[in-house]
Every structure is written in C-alpha cells, then in structure tokens.
C-alpha cells in the first residue's frame, strides 16, 4: 500500500513539473512575441476603382506606433506604384522615422492596353495636361476618387493618426497632390510638391493647407526665378504665390541660400507654413532620387535630398 502511494505521489510530482515546464515555455513564447518587433513589410494591396485594377503598395517599418503617421507618394509620368517605391528613397526615410509610406498607382494613357514607358505612359490626369484615351463603354479615370478611396482604405486598416496624413508628389504627381489637397483640405495635413504647379487652383480653400513647393531654376516645366515678372501671380497655373493667397498669407519673404532661394509666406491663416525652395542648376527632377543628375559647372552646392526635406517639413507641421 505504501509502495503504491509512493508511486502515485511520484507520478503526481512529475506531472506537476511537466505542467510547470509547459507553462514556462508558453510564457517565454508569449514574451518573445511581445518583445520581438514586427519585421518591416512591403505589402501589395489589391484595389479596383471605376473598373480599373490599381493596386497600391504600403510599407510598414519595423518600429511603428499604434497610430502612425503616413506619407502618400505619387510619382510622375511613366511611374508605377512599384517604381515610385524604389526611386525616391522613402523606404529608408520611413525606417529612420517610423511612419507608413503608401504608393498609389497611376493609369496608362490607353487603359485597355499594357503600360509602355514610350508609347503608353502612365500619368495623373490634370486639367490642361494629358488626358486618358478611353474606348466606348469605359468609365472615366477618376484619380481624385481613387486616391480618396485608397486613403480611406489605409485609415481603416492601419489606424492612422488623422492629424498626420501627408502627400508628396513629383512632376505629374506634384500637380495631382496639389489638386487633391485643394479639394480635400480637411483630410490632408500637409503636402510637398516638386517640379510641377497646380493646374486648376480653386477660388478658395475650406481649410489652409501647409505646403513645401520645390522647383529647379532650369526646369522646363516652370522657372522659379520668373517671380520678378508682373504676370507671375496671375498665371493660370497655381504656383507658390497662389498657395500664399489660398492660405490667407500676408507677407512674402526671400532668403538666399547656398543652393538657391527660399521664399516663404508669413502671417498665414492658422499659422500654416507656405514655403518655396528654388534650386539653382536643377532641372526637372527630385534631388536625391535614383534619377537625379550631377550638378553643372563644378559649382559647390549643398547636396539636397528632397525626401529628407519633405519629411522634415511634415514633422515640423505636427510639432507646431
């Protein structure tokens, strides 16, 4: 009898030790999952708008808050969501600063045919610029509606900080970013526009929009140093002067820098920043991108990285 009780006691002790080991293993596993940061991830999210397949890319860095900031980057003519994710250095910027970066997808000139960088280029549709060639029965390419739908999708899925939603664009994407922000100023908290003006400025805004507007003095799209022209502020395209008026600003200032001239508006509504950087010896490009070119004439010009400048501008808006 004593022997049997001893055996039962020994088995019970072994079972107890086993349960404790399993509990410890489970605890360590859960703790590791909590402590271990999520890996950085680039995700392609399928998306259809107005009958057009337009997947967007979203990059989540490893260290991200529960309510992160987000930057939406729009490339220029011939770009895709995938090429924009490579070309402008936003992945590294997001890794360093801990925000989401989203790359929406433009539509080709002839949407029913494969995109071709020579004969069937992609672009963002703007008044006074290119237009998509549709066959009978095709719905319009609604870039504004598409971007808003993507924005809502990202907000609902990724729980964005609604006070830190920013848009940046180059060339055709610059014009689209400005147009989109002018139509939806309550949703967009700041924009950076590089190398193309706003093609269809509104008469007024429902809310002032912070903007950093960047152009090169050798850009064929627009010369920033035409500011001395008496017709500069009344051109049909919306430049940085137009944005000053839209944002209710009072005074213009200019400051020479080693890389060009920085113009700024003071006394803007809600104290929003309205800045314009005009860079000497710069053509139609995003400085610091894969496609940017060496400077001319051997001049010593401070190296500029527009992606760094864009994020610093966005971060400064939130810090105000």
Image (cartoon, grey):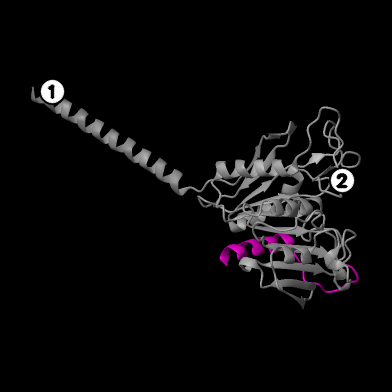
Disc 1 is placed on an element classified as helix
Question: At x 90% / y 42%, what residue is drawn?
Answer: 118
- Could you say which is closer to the camera, residue 130 or residue 105? 130
Q: Quadrant of residue 98?
A: bottom right
The residue beneath circle 1 is 4
Left or right: residue 117 compared with residue 23 = right
Give the camera-side residue of 173 and 237.
Answer: 237
Sooner in the amino-acid sequence: mark 2 or mark 1 = 1
Q: Which residue is mark 2?
A: 130
- On the rendered image, what quadrant is the N terminus found in? top left
- Residue 72 in sight here: yes
Residue 288 vertical position relative to residue 104 in the rendered view, above or below:
below
- State the CA–CA distance, disc 2 to disc 1: 91 Å
Q: Residue at x 75, y 48 (%)?
A: 84
How far from the left and from the top, in percent, is residue 42?
64, 43
Question: Which label is found at residue 240?
Answer: none
Residue 188: x %, y % from top left: 64, 54
Q: Image point 87% across, 73% down: which residue?
A: 228
Query: In the image, what residue occupies the spot 61% across and 58% down?
Result: 96
Residue extending farthest left:
1
Image quadrant where one finds the C terminus:
bottom right
- Between 6 and 262, the one lying in front of the other is 262
Image x and y of residue 36, in percent: 48, 47
């Amino acid at each position: 009898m004593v022997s049997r009780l001893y055996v039962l006691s020994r088995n019970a002790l072994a079972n107890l030790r086993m349960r404790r080991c399993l509990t410890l293993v489970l605890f360590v596993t859960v703790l590791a999952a909590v402590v271990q940061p999520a890996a950085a991830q680039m995700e392609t999210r399928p998306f259809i708008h107005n009958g057009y397949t337009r997947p967007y890319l979203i990059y989540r860095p490893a260290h991200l808050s529960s309510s992160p900031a987000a930057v939406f980057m729009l490339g220029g003519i011939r770009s895709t969501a995938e090429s924009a994710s490579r070309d402008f250095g936003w992945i590294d910027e997001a890794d360093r600063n801990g925000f989401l970066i989203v790359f929406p997808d433009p539509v080709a000139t002839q949407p029913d045919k494969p995109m071709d960088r020579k004969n069937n280029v992609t672009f963002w549709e703007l008044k006074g610029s290119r237009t998509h060639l549709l066959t009978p029965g095709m719905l319009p390419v609604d870039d504004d509606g598409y971007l808003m739908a993507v924005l809502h999708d990202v907000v609902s899925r990724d729980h964005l900080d609604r006070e830190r939603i920013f848009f940046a664009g180059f060339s055709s994407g610059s014009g689209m970013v400005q147009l989109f922000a002018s139509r939806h100023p309550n949703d967009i908290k700041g924009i950076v526009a590089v190398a193309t003006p706003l093609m269809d400025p509104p008469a007024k805004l429902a809310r002032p929009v912070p903007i950093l507007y960047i152009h090169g003095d050798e850009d064929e799209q627009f010369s920033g140093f035409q500011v001395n022209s008496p017709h500069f502020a009344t051109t049909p395209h919306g430049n940085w002067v137009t944005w000053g008026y839209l944002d209710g600003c009072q005074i213009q200032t200019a400051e020479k820098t080693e890389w060009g001239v920085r113009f700024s508006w003071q006394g803007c509504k809600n104290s929003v920043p309205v800045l314009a950087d005009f860079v000497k010896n710069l053509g139609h490009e995003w400085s610091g991108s894969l496609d940017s070119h060496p400077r001319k004439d051997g001049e010593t010009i401070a190296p500029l990285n527009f992606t760094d400048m864009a994020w610093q501008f966005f971060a400064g808006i939130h810090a105000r």
